Amino acid sequence: MDAKAKERLDFILGRRSVRVYRPGEVNEETVEALLEAAMAAPSAVAKDPWRFVVVRNRVTLGRLADALPNGGMIRDAELGIIVCGDLEAAHDRQLSYLLQDCSAAIENLLLAVHIVGLGACWLGVHPREERVRKLKEILELPASVLPVAAIAIGWPGEQKEPRTRFNPALVIERSGKGGARRRGPGFLLKAGAGVRLPHFTRGRICLNSSVPPLEQFEEGHFRGNNHGAGGLHAPTASR
């Protein structure tokens, strides 16, 4: 990898959640640029079900802070952007597609905030029913529009060092030629009897019926149990 590419990737590691803000206006041109970046995210069948509510009113920001546990920082932010999704506009009207699309838009928004020198914090709303209900009430959202997250945005009042959370133990490589290789120690997958594991390729998961059942995997790569048919569970580190 060349130095320029590495520098760009390192920039992503510098994006941190900022919860303290100093006074300073964020002009409309900047907000529009942030929203343009958010809407450049991928969306299932290009349905773009995301909807954005920009909040600058101090009273409304205070009500949002009161409605969101651990969301007090939005009270002091210059603005909040509430990322919502319209279920009627989502692909096949599926909640899962809506949430994936909105999450992609949120990450684009957070990176754009970092690029322009602002700070932001992602506050989860969905699936907490009480938070969803309160934000729908505060923002007077239509019935089909679901608040997914609130993003507090302002000029950073704190500085955080870049960091990486890369963990090789969470990556499995599978070449398609049989067997699987762990990048790091301690990766454990559990599956019920007869459950087929997904096909892993550099962190991507593709369900593939040709992948052998768990008991056929090489000893030492995966360990399973036959205590019921609970299906495939999330990976957890073995000890």
Image (cartoon, grey):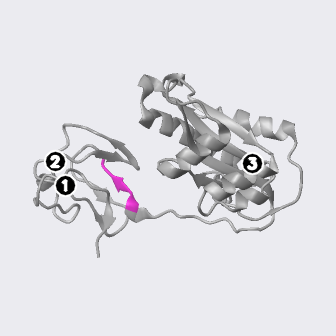
Question: In front: 231, or 176?
Answer: 231
Boundaries of the magenta span: 170-174
Residue under numbered circle 3: 60
Q: Secondary structure at mark 3?
A: helix
Q: Residue at x 25, y 59 (%)?
A: 189
Q: Residue furthest bottom?
A: 239
Which residue is tagged 2? 195
Q: Disc 3 or disc 2, which is closer to the eye?
A: 3
Q: Disc number at residue 191?
A: 1
Counting from the top left corner in percent of width and height, residue 176 is at 26, 43
* Image coords of residue 152 (percent x, y): 71, 53
For the point 64% across and 60% down, the residue is 71
Q: Amino acid at mark 3?
A: Thr
**What whole-number distance in Å separates the C-alpha atoms at marks 3 and 2?**
49 Å
Is residue 114 visible in the rendered structure shown here?
no
Q: Is residue 30 magenta?
A: no
